[in-house]
Amino acid sequence: MVGVGIWGLLIASCLVLLALLALAALAARTAEHPADRRALRAEADELAAEAQAIAAAADTARTAADQLRDRAAAAEQARDDAWQRQETAGRAYQQALLADQEDRPAAVVTGAPLPAEHGRDVSRAALTAYRRGDISVQQLRAVWRRAGGGPPAPTAGDRPDRAVDRHRVRDQAARREYDVVAAAARRAAEAAYVAELSAAALAEEASAAAVDAEEARYVADRAERSH
């Protein structure tokens, strides 16, 4: 859309400039060549038609820009809604993890625990890996146990907490949805911005073309009145 607007603007400017140069040459020759007065009027009419065409293109560009701005606003709202859903899913997932931890009985920790600060870092890294689906619930609990906190590792007959897994899946889905919607909102905002620039440039060119057309009509009228 940028290329169309810019090239259209350049072409229109060149046409208007060439027409005005032709008008100036014709106006200088009207005294000696009466037939040139008809050509002068034709050139003035052509400039007027060109000005109307540019004005129509500017109106179309403004309508398109308004529509794209509305779409961008809707995309931004969808992005905000997706963010809220992601936040809700994330909180529910964290609550499920905490509830699962509280429901687990305390266990004897085997092996030397990690230093407190290092243990916290390891625990956070393990939680991030679990949320991505890289490790299982059993592995997460084992890391927490080794880090000196969190629930014990599950026994051989234990199974992962299905509620936690369900919330993890929902959290991941909400995050993916937000990424997709946020990218769409960025594209919509960029398209609206480009369209507004193109519309503004065309509106400015339409104004200049209207002035040139009016000047051409004045020159043609003056040439006709002088003979």
Image (cartoon, rainbow, N blue to C red):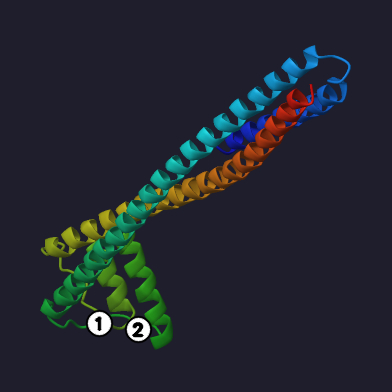
Residue 7 or 20: which is nearer the viewer?
Answer: 20
- Residue at coordinates 36% horizontally, 56% vertically from top-left? 76
Question: Is 212 on the left or on the right of 23, as rendered?
Answer: left
To which residue does mark 1 refer? 109
Q: Position of residue 58 (x, y in %)?
A: 53, 39
Instruction: Please tell me which residue is depicted at 79% across the width and 21% down the height of the picture.
Output: 227
Q: CA distance from mark 2 to mark 1?
A: 8 Å
- Which x, y percent locates residue 129? 35, 63
Identified by mark 1, the residue type is Val
Q: Quadrant of the N terminus?
A: top right
Residue underneath mark 2: 113
Q: Indicate the position of residue 66 as horizontal and vertical percent values.
A: 42, 47
**As drawn, is 44 to the left or to the right of 56?**
right
Marks 2/1 in contact by CB < 8 Å: the verdict is yes
Q: Nearer the viewer, residue 159 or 22?
A: 22
Q: Which amino acid does the dot numbered 2 rest on?
A: Pro
Coordinates of residue 35 in the picture (x, y in percent): 78, 12
